[in-house]
Image (cartoon, rainbow, N blue to C red):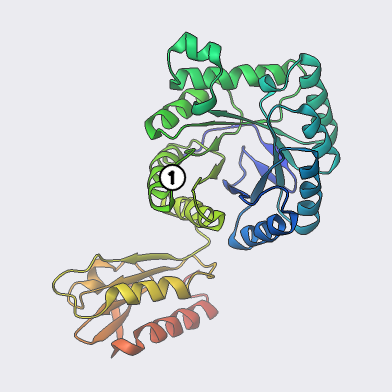
Amino acid sequence: MERRKTKKIKVGNIYIGGDAKITVQSMLNRPASDIEGSVRQAVELEKAGCEIIRAAVPDMQAVKLIEKLKESLSVPVVADIHFDYRLALECVAAGVDKIRINPGNIGSKERVKAVADACKAAGVPIRIGVNSGSLEKELLAEYGSPTPEALVESAMRHAAMLEECDFDDIVISIKSSNVPMMVRAYELACERCDYPLHLGVTEAGTHNMALVKSAAGIGSLLLHGIGDTIRVSMTADPVLEVKAANDILKAVGLKTDCPDIVSCPTCGRTKIDLIALASEVEQRLAGCKKPIKVAVMGCAVNGPGEAREADIGIAGGDGCALIFKKGEIICKVPETEAVDRLMKEIIYKAERSAFY
């Protein structure tokens, strides 16, 4: 797929937009006053593969959290601020890498200019975040409801305020819990600007529904070349958000530095515990950074042929399993030894760069 061309913006030690890879974000959900717990959670997120970490800054005391995060992480830190422009100024002074704030919500033009000037001097970009649940009253009156058109108009008005201050290091997000509305809003935004887009379905729910909504919304946009950075929002441990976001990138072909595991849904021909085997293979390959395609198939009759595109795989028999490579059977082992033998073959081939 051809990605939409967007402005390339530096955020700490990485880039968003342009030819930069699509980055994965998440947000801390510990109380901002719990600095130790928030830092611990941030470190866990970075270990899980989160590439940008956002923290709420509700008051001046929370600025200390930004300082501690900068000391503890190697990934960029974003300060999420509402209403009080002084918090933005203090976070910039504390070394934050990006500010999330809506200029229209912080008061006078002088305040907007103060934030824009501080960010410009420090090389700190600003993300405008429009949400269907907090659309301005005048736009609700004009459009009648939070329509995609109203959401985009809100984002463009916020961006114009920064542009009037000679500031254009801008990232835009336009989120809704309604997937069709979110998708359409981002499509319309592409027609109005070339700023990088931060994709997400807001208030998406607990793990399972959030994963489905985000895969549908974020995934469909990515498949059409739209999007420069993503966050999967969940009412759950944010580490799960990171895993889900990376899985979406993998599913649409935008993340290839990891295994691609394919497995069949099983049927009446299956005579081994394929669900347990597939789960174990996935778990053992969780830390692998190689683009290997591994198949876990339930039927020894059709498995190797159906998964001939896989680099290596397992096909179940009656209490046994066939190990195959590129559709060709290389050995037969007892079911209890199947995963160990598969991993041995993967390691053996990886050491000899047979797949890469």
Which residue: 43% across, 20% down? 147
Task: Tell me, yes or no, if residue 39 can be seen here.
Answer: yes
Mark 1, other Cα within 10 Å: few <14 / some 14–19 / many ≥20: some
The front one of 127 and 7 is 127
Identify the residue shown where x is 49% and y is 83%: 348
Q: Residue at x 27, y 78 (%)?
A: 273
In the rendered image, residue 112, in percent from the top left (x then y), is placed at 76, 21
Give the image location of residue 237, x and y in percent.
Answer: 53, 56
Name the kind of residue labelled 1 in the image.
Gly
Secondary structure beneath disc 1? loop
As drawn, is 49 to the left or to the right of 233?
A: right
- Relative to 299, 238 lies left or right: right
Vertical placement of 224 versus 266: above or below? above
Q: Is residue 66 above or below residue 332?
A: above
Which x, y percent locates residue 165? 77, 18
Question: Residue 272 falls in which quadrant of the image?
Answer: bottom left
Residue 213: percent from left, percent from top: 39, 43
Residue bearing mark 1: 205
Number of marks in picture: 1
Q: Is residue 249 above or below residue 117?
A: below
Residue sitting farthest toward the top: 142
Q: Quadrant of residue 12?
A: top right
Which is more toward the observer, 342 or 51?
51
The residue closer to the viewer here, 289 or 115, is 115
Tell me if residue 327 can be seen: no
